[in-house]
Image (cartoon, grey):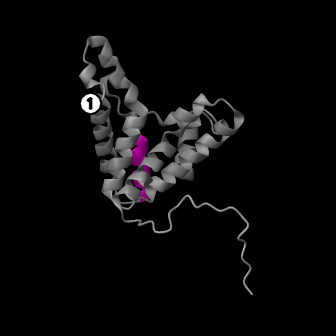
């Protein structure tokens, strides 16, 4: 005898006929990973203990999903979206020089640069080396500015806000 629970409200957020090979699904997947890697920037706006506690663990989840990415295209697009989510504000400075048309172009260029850097990290054969390569991206300082700083993962949460905490997060992933 099969019990049917027709009286319970049910709504599926995932369509039943979701094709995992579709382009839309792949874009959503890499954007979700980029949001997980950028969560500490955007969750810092909500100053409560829950978001501060969960932020490093979401970053670890993003690193794990990044390592499980299957091909170099996914690494490129994750790097592209991370570049846009972290550095969209750089294009706003062109407003002060009357170069308003560069506002959308600058984040896209930065996204392509970080997409190429992430794709270069995919060329490393083993996951540990890929993770080390992604960690080493933070040591690239164009124009003397610390652009991609993975230390933001350790600002909130249980981990030490130093390189020791960052290395701990990367090793957990």
What is the magenta range?
127-137
Q: Is residue 135 rendered magenta in the image?
A: yes
Q: Position of residue 141 (x, y in %)?
A: 35, 29
Q: Indicate the quadrant where residue 21 lies.
A: bottom left
Q: Indicate the quadrant where residue 165 lies.
A: top right
The image shows residue 136, relative to residue 71, as above or below, that is above
The image shows residue 100, relative to residue 72, as above or below, that is above
Inspect this view and state whether residue 69 appears: yes
The quarter of the picture where the N terminus appears is bottom right
Q: Position of residue 146 (x, y in %)?
A: 41, 27
- Could you tell me which residue is drawn at 60 percent across and 46 percent down? 57
In this view, the residue farthest toward the bottom is 1
Badge 1 marks a residue whose secondary structure is helix
Dot 1 corresponds to which residue?
Answer: 105
Which is more toward the observer, 171 or 8?
Answer: 8
Q: Indicate the quadrant where residue 47 lies.
A: top right
Q: Residues within 10 Å of mark 1 (few under 14, many from 20)?
A: few
Which is more toward the observer, 149 or 1?
Answer: 1
The image shows residue 148, relative to residue 126, as above or below, that is above
């Amino acid at each position: 005898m099969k019990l049917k629970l027709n009286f319970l409200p049910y709504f599926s957020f995932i369509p039943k006929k979701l094709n995992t090979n579709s382009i839309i699904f792949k874009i959503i997947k890499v954007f979700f990973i980029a949001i997980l890697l950028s969560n500490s920037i955007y969750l810092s706006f909500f100053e409560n203990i829950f978001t501060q506690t969960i932020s490093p663990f979401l970053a670890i989840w993003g690193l794990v999903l990044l390592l499980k990415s299957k091909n170099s295209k996914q690494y490129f697009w994750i790097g592209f979206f991370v570049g846009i989510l972290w550095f969209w504000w750089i294009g706003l400075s062109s407003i002060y020089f009357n170069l308003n048309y560069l506002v959308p172009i600058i984040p896209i260029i930065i996204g392509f640069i970080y997409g190429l850097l992430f794709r270069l990290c995919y060329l490393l054969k083993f996951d540990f080396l890929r993770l080390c390569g992604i960690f080493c991206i933070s040591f690239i300082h164009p124009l003397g500015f610390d652009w991609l700083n993975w230390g933001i993962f350790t600002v909130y949460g249980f981990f030490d806000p130093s390189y020791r905490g960052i290395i701990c997060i990367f090793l957990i992933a």
